[in-house]
């Protein structure tokens, strides 16, 4: 019963609060970047929506990952960026406004695209005896409730009570990081007997997804001749996914622990890879400025 309450109530409620916090930092003017910087926004959105699941599928084929573990990596790839991507964009001295816009735009699109694309991959990756029920309309509705509605509510609060929104935003960001770490710790403890085997397989897959997408995002942005701040934003936004949302989809919506393993490994690794990638970007920028 306690596990059911955690998975069905506490997890979605916590994600609701996290997405509300994202909305608290947004205002309608932030979406003007779609018009002001259309190339950067379109490139970032397409890279996240199309490139990420394709890379994830290639990793699955390369590492011979099967069943629920493979589906878990696809779930992760289909999720938008989160507050962590915005934080690392700030630390990397990237275009934070672009990062926030990409996070919010993809978060608003995901509830409609994720169930359909995920269903296609599930048919491809799961055998006939391992089918998982995924009612598309119900899943869309559930994702709307825990993502789009709190983001919209947060924007309304920001509009009506801007000082309160600014004050609350910081606390929610801290909550989101602490909660993610607690959930990851809980999943590791629950699966401790299998965790070494899971981490060998899914740790490498998650690491590859993270690192490959960061560098491909950077390369695409450079090829599009965006400025360096925008390149950094797209690289981090494409490379960092909302691990909490992936875990909620796996545990609360699909009720499958193995599907949460990829997001668990990813959430442990991304703080390290993000710090290293940020350091590389900052040192490269400092070197180009002095040379």
Image: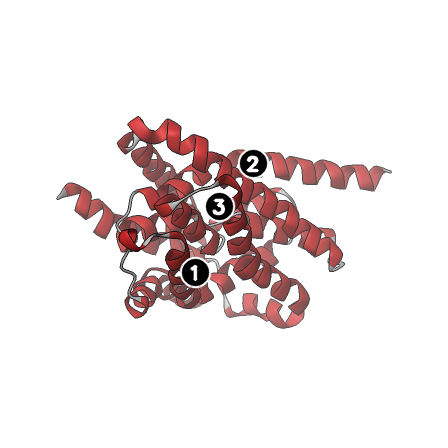
Q: Earlier in the sequence, mark 2 or mark 3?
A: 3
Q: Is residue 232 visible?
A: no
Which residue has dot 3 on it?
60
- Position of residue 18 relative to residue 272, above or below, is below
- Position of residue 290 relative to residue 171, above or below, is above
Q: Position of residue 120 (x, y in %)?
A: 41, 62
For the C terminus, which image quadrant? top right
Residue placed most toward the observer, 234 or 116: 116
Q: Earlier in the sequence, mark 3 or mark 1?
A: 1
User: Regarding mark 3 in the picture, which secondary structure is present there?
Assistant: helix
The residue located at (44%, 42%) in the rendering is: 65
Residue 45, which numbered label? none
**Residue at the extreme bottom:** 35
Which residue has dot 1 on it?
23
Which residue has dot 2 on it?
273
Residue 84 located left or right of residue 184: right
Q: Position of residue 174 (x, y in %)?
A: 41, 42
């Amino acid at each position: 019963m306690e596990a059911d309450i955690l998975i069905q109530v506490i997890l979605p409620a916590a994600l609701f609060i996290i997405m509300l916090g994202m909305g608290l930092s947004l205002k309608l003017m932030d979406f003007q970047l779609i018009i002001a910087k259309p190339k950067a926004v379109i490139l970032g959105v397409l890279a996240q929506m199309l490139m990420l699941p394709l890379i994830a599928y290639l990793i699955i084929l390369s590492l011979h990952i099967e069943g629920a573990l493979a589906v878990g990596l696809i779930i992760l790839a289909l999720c938008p960026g989160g507050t962590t991507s915005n934080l690392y964009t700030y630390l990397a001295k990237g275009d934070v406004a672009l990062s926030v816009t990409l996070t919010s735009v993809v978060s608003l699109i995901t509830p409609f695209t994720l169930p359909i694309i995920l269903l296609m991959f599930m048919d491809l990756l799961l055998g006939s005896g391992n089918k998982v029920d995924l009612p598309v309309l119900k899943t869309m509705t559930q994702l709307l409730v825990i993502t789009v509605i709190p983001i919209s509510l947060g924007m309304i609060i920001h509009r009506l009570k801007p000082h309160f929104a600014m004050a609350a935003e910081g606390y929610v960001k801290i909550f989101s990081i602490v909660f993610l770490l607690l959930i990851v710790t809980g999943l590791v403890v629950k699966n401790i007997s299998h965790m070494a085997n899971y981490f060998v397989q899914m740790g490498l897959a998650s690491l590859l997804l993270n690192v490959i997408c960061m560098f491909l995002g950077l390369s695409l942005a450079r090829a599009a001749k965006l400025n360096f701040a925008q390149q950094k934003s797209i690289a981090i936004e494409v490379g960092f996914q909302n691990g909490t949302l992936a875990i909620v989809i796996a545990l609360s919506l699909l009720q499958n622990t193995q599907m949460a393993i990829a997001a668990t490994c990813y959430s442990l690794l991304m703080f390290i890879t993000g710090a290293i990638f940020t350091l590389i970007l900052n040192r490269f920028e400092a070197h180009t400025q002095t040379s």
